[in-house]
Amino acid sequence: MTSQETPSQAIPWRATVLTLFPDMFPGPLGVSLAGKALATGLWALEARDIRASATDRHRSVDDTPAGGGPGMVLRADVLAAAIDAAAIAPDRPRLLMSPRGRPLTQTHVAELAAGPGPLIVCGRFEGIDQRVIEARRLEEVSIGDYVLSGGEIAAMALIDACVRLLPGVMGKLASGTEESFSEGLLEYPQYTRPQEFEGRQIPEILISGDHAKVAAWRLAQSEALTAARRPDLLARKAGQKAAPRGTKNTTDG
């Protein structure tokens, strides 16, 4: 068994992924910003095969659902053994990518990025045995109201969102603070050369050189887009502002 990790500030942010398809990793995480940061040691990735913890000669990891029904369910004993074999430090979050989980938000991403990095379980089949979720204290996280074939793509999305917030990964700090959701609003429209494209001009205010007016225009655009496309974000933002001082606001979870 792998020796237990110990919490340490010297260890880079890391993601430990438990999956039946470890060859899917790093996948997209091995290119662009995340890939460069991975190659230079700004973060670490370990993909572990759940099937390695199976004990029978067929390396079985699933069985039929109790009570009947279609599909198969990932066994509690096999997955628990895989989690235990990862031997992660006790301060690292244990996540399960699941469509019934807590919706992933930018606030949650920032919390995960500020920590030591999570262990992420990628489910398959009809799901995993509820008993291992409870016994190993897995926090269920969802990236949206839809169902994927497995948790691997969802895990990649979560990891990518975290990695780009790590110190040294992005070229300019402002790049991560002026994007959609960072301030509870959708990002304003972006423009670049050429100044005219198929009869469409860059808004004059953006080339005026007046930084205060540019900032005001961008804020107004963000608020208008958010009101039109994601009014729930504006409602959440208003609720956070209205929360009494000293009271923890829980609307983000």
Image (cartoon, helix red, strand yellow):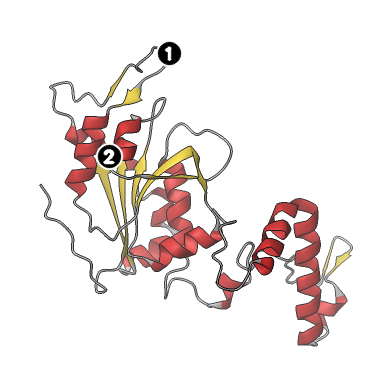
Q: Residues within 10 Å of mark 1 (few under 14, many from 20)?
A: few
> Of callouts 2 and 1, which one flags the residue occurring earlier in the amino acid sequence?
1
Residue 135's label in the rendered image is 2
Q: Nearer the viewer, mark 2 or mark 1?
A: 2
Write the residue at 17% across / 45% down.
85
The residue lying toward the viewer, choosing from 30 and 134, is 134
Give the labeled residue for mark 1: 69
Q: Is residue 118 visible?
A: yes
In the depicted structure, whether residue 59 falls above or below residue 154: above
Relative horizontal placement of residue 151, taking residue 197 as reference (left or right): left
Type of amino acid under label 2: Ala
Q: Position of residue 148 (x, y in %)?
A: 50, 34
On the image, which quarter does residue 134 sit in? top left
Q: CA distance from mark 2 to mark 1?
A: 24 Å
Relative horizontal placement of residue 191, taking residue 158 as reference (left or right): right
Residue placed furthest toward the right: 199
Write the residue at 42% across / 70% down.
166
Residue 38's label in the rendered image is none
Write the residue at 49% across / 59% down.
108
